[in-house]
């Protein structure tokens, strides 16, 4: 697997600060000389389509220089992705092919390596032959940005942060839900990792799983409610440790999480967008709230909300109006409802206050049934 090697330097991620720090690395001199000789022999590197030129060198300059992943870290990456015989492991920027070959030899998986450098592709194929896994692996000389990766069940990366970010849209677009992505040392843009581990040598590995797509389009696009407004909503509802706070369209989960943190309440978030559900669960886990907060992937119009003692809404006037009948039918008398910015159909609120963000906040109490 390859990564950038620029002027004898490389980057690593500091877990505590999550900033990039530079450290000197020892790049393999023979490998570096080989690459230089190959480039000089070609006269130039055309920045056109992926593939090879007549001189047997890349048709464009690689995005990264080659620096191999240690076998211990490569094995840790495959373990983190829970690779098994049913998997197809794609390594983008596969270098000497060690991750793909290891996946086939140790875990019985099939593998595909995508590498721009011809000499590394040949090295990978020789290693596969020597390991007896040639029938289970394929090495493609090509541009990882243009190669189809849709058949992957696992994708491994040891690239540069800018390359990871450039790949983000492709990974989202081409990979199927459930595909695992593992990156060595660097995260992927603004994706929140599902799991982060540190190996024995101090290397940080990140794991993501491509989420399922929503069962239908969300009713409202996610816009995070400012935290001071969330506190104001919870205060308006007079939340206590005895409450069960349901947030309908819970987004990143901040309302149930803050209700649990600040008031000791239990929280339930209902959200239709799988990535937001995963983010919410991870934040709850990171804050040791797994026992007090639950996030359910589902449709707020069909979810059971009968156990709520407080319901919060940060939706739209149209969605609120559609919810009015459900709220009146399913919620127990005395349940408090707080809505940010929008009323609920023709239901007259019991109280209205001005929010810190300039929007109104509305409070209702479900009346006794007649």
Image (spheres, grey):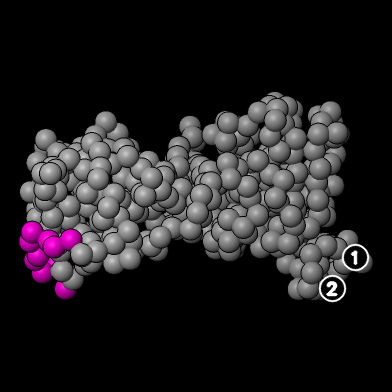
In the drawing, what numbered circle is on residue 55?
1
Check disc 1 and report its element: helix, strand or loop. loop
State the extent of the magenta-drawn residues as a range. 347-358
**Residue 55 percent across, percent down from the top left:** 90, 65
Numbered tag placed on residue 43 in the rendering: 2
Percent x, y for residue 274? 46, 48
Seen at 66% across and 28% down, the residue is: 84
**Is 200 drawn above or below residue 220 in the view shown?**
above
Q: Is residue 259 visible?
A: no
Quadrant showing the C terminus:
top left
Crowdedness of circle 1 by 10 Å Cα count: few (<14), some, many (20+)? some
| Location of residue 179 by image quarter | top right
Q: Residue at x 69, y 40 (%)?
A: 89
On the image, the x and y values in percent for residue 194 come to 45, 42
Q: Along the line of sight, which residue is nearer the eye, 249 or 127? A: 249
Residue in the image at 70% along x and 51% along y: 149
356 to the left or right of 81: left
The nearer-to-camera label among 2 and 1 is 1
Please tell me whether residue 349 belongs to the stretch shown in magenta.
Answer: yes
Name the secondary structure under disc 2: loop
Q: Earlier in the sequence, mark 2 or mark 1?
A: 2
Instruction: Using the rendered view, name the quadrant where residue 78 is placed.
Output: top right
The residue at the far right in this view is 54
Q: Look at the numbered discs 2 and 1 and tell me whether their residues touch, using CB distance below 8 Å.
A: yes
């Amino acid at each position: 697997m390859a990564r950038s090697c620029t002027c004898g330097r490389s980057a690593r991620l500091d877990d505590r600060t999550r900033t990039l720090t530079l450290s000197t690395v020892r790049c393999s001199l023979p490998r570096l000389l080989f690459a230089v000789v190959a480039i000089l022999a070609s006269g130039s590197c055309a920045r056109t389509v992926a593939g090879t030129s007549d001189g047997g060198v890349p048709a464009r300059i690689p995005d990264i220089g080659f620096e191999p992943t240690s076998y211990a870290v490569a094995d840790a990456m495959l373990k983190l992705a829970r690779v098994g015989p049913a998997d197809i492991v794609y390594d983008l920027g596969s270098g000497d092919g060690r991750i793909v070959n290891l996946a086939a030899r140790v875990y019985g998986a099939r593998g595909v390596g995508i590498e721009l450098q011809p000499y590394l592709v040949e090295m990978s194929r020789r290693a596969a032959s020597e390991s007896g896994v040639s029938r289970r692996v394929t090495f493609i000389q090509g541009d990882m940005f243009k190669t189809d990766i849709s058949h992957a069940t696992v994708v491994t990366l040891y690239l540069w942060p800018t390359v990871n970010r450039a790949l983000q849209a492709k990974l989202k677009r081409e990979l199927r839900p459930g595909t695992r992505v593992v990156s060595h040392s660097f995260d992927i843009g603004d994706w929140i990792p599902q799991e982060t581990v540190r190996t024995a040598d101090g290397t940080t590995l990140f794991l993501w799983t491509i989420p399922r797509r929503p069962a239908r389009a969300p009713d409202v696009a996610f816009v995070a409610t400012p935290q001071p407004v969330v506190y104001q909503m919870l205060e308006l509802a007079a939340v206590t440790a005895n409450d069960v706070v349901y947030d309908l369209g819970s987004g990143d989960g901040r309302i149930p999480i803050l209700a649990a943190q600040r008031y000791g309440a239990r929280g339930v978030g209902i959200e239709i967008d799988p990535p937001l559900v995963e983010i919410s669960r991870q934040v709850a886990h990171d804050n040791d709230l797994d026992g007090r907060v639950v996030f359910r992937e589902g449709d707020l119009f069909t979810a059971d909300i009968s156990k709520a003692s407080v319901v919060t809404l940060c939706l739209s006037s149209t969605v609120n109006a559609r919810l009015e009948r459900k709220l009146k039918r399913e919620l127990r008398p005395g349940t408090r409802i707080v809505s940010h910015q929008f009323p609920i159909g023709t239901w007259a609120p019991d109280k209205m206050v001005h929010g810190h963000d300039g929007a109104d906040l509305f409070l209702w109490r479900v009346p006794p049934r007649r």
